[in-house]
Amino acid sequence: MGKASDYWTFLRLDPSGTYRSLEKLEIKAFFQQQFPDQDDWESLTHEAIQSHLFSLLDGSIELQQAAMFSLRCFISHQIVQTCLSLVNQFGSFYRFGLTDLLPLVLDDDGRVPLSSYASLSQQILKTFKPGSGSFSHWITRLVRQHRELNHLLLEHGLYLISDWAILNDTPIDRLRRILNEFFSLAPAEIEQACHLLESYRAIYLPEHTHSRQCQPPTEDQLQRMSDRFQQQTETRIRPDTFLNYLESLAKQLRQHRITARTGRPPTQPIEDSEAQEYPTENQDESCDPATENQFLVKYRQVFESALDNALQTVVQDRIQKAKNQRSAIAFSKHCSCFTVST
């Protein structure tokens, strides 16, 4: 187990946007009463402690409030750790810090009984089902799915969703429209990308447990996806290369979603996109690395050209809107010079 003090120290947002730790002595005494042998604290798991605390929520009012606040203490630590993880992983590149995130999610005021405001901590406690999984993972999941947090991350160019979740909720018709209108790919490339996505969804979706986070396809799934793709297109590619194509496709869809939601081009550099050309029909991939490198070079050229066109479209739209606004202002001033006579 980690620090036992996580169950009696409460992390609260301070005016500077960071946090301060408040030791709750009455909750510490409660914890020591529930787990009197401190020598056993190191061997206790979080699951065992949390299971006991949740069981006390059916007890007396005093036990309920103490157990509830102890869990709120733990939640506050997990919220801060999740935000720190996001900052460490993405903050430097996307230019956001802990003080940008905490005011959005560390919103429990620490009052007993709970205030009428529905804090994130309350939502976490209300929606978690003891015995259904890890409490820590549930906290992390709800923090990362928080609407205002994700809106802020989008403003910084970060779309916080896995590649597999993107592919799961992208219908084939939408993919075809995006690759045509946003990336201006050739019809043959679009069709092959659609076959890639269809092969992926046909195998992955029926076997995905929706209560769990989307995981990368297994080797067995990738092999079956590759076989299905070959049946449809007469194009044979290795499962590991099929995975690379899927990741490339997901990155394009991610970039489109960032631009569509923010009106700004994606922040991710082209050279980090690891984009690859989609396989052409009758391509027998017996796996010449030089051939794959040629695909990569060609695809990046197409991708950069398509992205340049998309950026140019966004810029031209903004310029045209600005011109229209100036024209409207000038017309309004011109009209104000006239008076209506009666």
Image: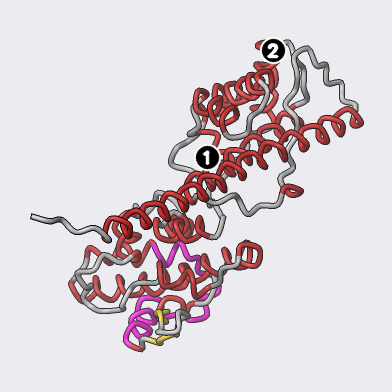
Instruction: Check if residue 44 falls in the magenta segment.
Output: yes
Q: Residue at x 37, y 79 (%)?
A: 31
Q: Are marks 2 and 1 in contact (CB under 8 Å)?
A: no
Q: Comparing marks 2 and 1, which lies closer to the viewer?
A: 2
Q: Residue at x 46, y 56 (%)?
A: 150
Judge whether 236 appears above or below 185 on screen. Answer: above
Picture disc at residue 165: 1
**Which of the 4 image quadrants contains residue 192?**
top right
The front one of 166 and 322 is 322
| Classed neighbour count for the residue bearing mark 1: other residues with Cα under 10 Å, few (<14), some (14–19), many (≥20) | some
- Given the image, on which type of amino acid does mark 1 rest? Ala
The front one of 19 and 233 is 233
Residue 318 locus on image (x, y percent)? 51, 50
Residue corresponding to mark 2: 233
Q: Is residue 274 left or right of residue 56?
A: right
Give, as a single range, the part of the protein colored magenta.
26-50
Secondary structure under the numbered disc 2 in the rendered image: helix
Q: Earlier in the sequence, mark 2 or mark 1?
A: 1
Judge whether 41 appears above or below 257 on screen. Answer: below
Residue 101 locus on image (x, y percent)? 47, 68
- Given the image, on which type of amino acid does mark 2 rest? Thr
Residue 40 appears in the picture as rendered: no
| Classed neighbour count for the residue bearing mark 2: other residues with Cα under 10 Å, few (<14), some (14–19), many (≥20) | some
Q: Is residue 37 left or right of residue 288?
A: left
Quadrant housing the N terminus: bottom right
